[in-house]
Amino acid sequence: MGKNDQPSQQRRGRTRLLLILAVCAAPMLLSYLAYYVIKPTGRTNYGTLIDPRQYPVPELDSTQISGEPATLQDYQGKWVMLQIAGAACDAACHGRMTKMRQLRLMQGKDMDRIERVWLITDNEQVETMTIREFEGIHMLRVDATKLKAWLPVDAPAVVEDHIYMIDPLGNLMLRFPKDSDPNKMVKDINKLLRASSIG
């Protein structure tokens, strides 16, 4: 093999690597293109779409309720349904968490693509019965000031009124309205899961 063959082999190797990267990235890029750029007439979304580039998940100084370190970034690679409330978890909080459990179950074989997270905005104790009732939901304590600076809301609503969706790349992308209808929410979630080949 001559020296002149080495540069051409290196070029071919780089070309192959770029093609492999393009093939891997294409499904996600196409899903975002379809969702954000191509807007077919008559397409409706129940939740409010959020430009994911504007709301990457920040550092929220979060921990598990046991005190162990944990962050929302730990769930990258999965879709995350997110709700916010104090540890006392009133009736509205219970309603949102019940809704999140139902919506995940409604995904059938795709349910494992979704994680559920409750961000707790104070240092109070979570009742044992609540922990048992919502086994499987990840409970993280967060800095409430940092949380509210991150999450978008439209007055007079507050962050606790909504269920949010985070994409598998760790970006906020959907906000459901207060007292949202699960039958309408599930359609939006189905669209997201169908549009994405990751998570």
Image (cartoon, rainbow, N blue to C red):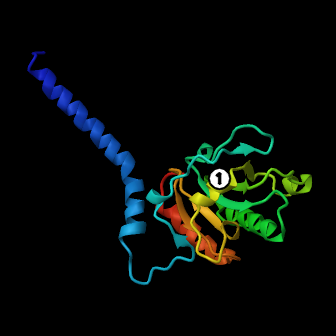
Depth check, front residue: 180 or 194: 180
Lateral position of residue 41 relative to residue 109, left or right: left
Q: Quadrant of residue 83?
A: bottom right
**Going 53% across and 56% down the picture, which residue do you hit?**
167
Point out residue 26 in the picture as x, y percentages from the top left corner.
36, 52
* Disc 1: CA contacts within 10 A as few (<14), some (14-19) or many (>=20): few
Q: Nearer the viewer, residue 52 or 181?
A: 52
- Above or below for 6 versus 145: above
Residue that label 1 marks: 112
Type of the residue with mark 1? Asp
Residue drawn at x 32%, y 46% as measured from the top left:
22
The x and y percentages for residue 147 are: 63, 56
Rendered location of residue 102, percent (x, y): 73, 66
The residue sitting at 66% across, 77% down in the picture is 183
Where's the N terminus, which quadrant? top left
Q: Nearer the viewer, residue 28 or 23?
A: 28
Camera-side residue: 150 or 82? 150
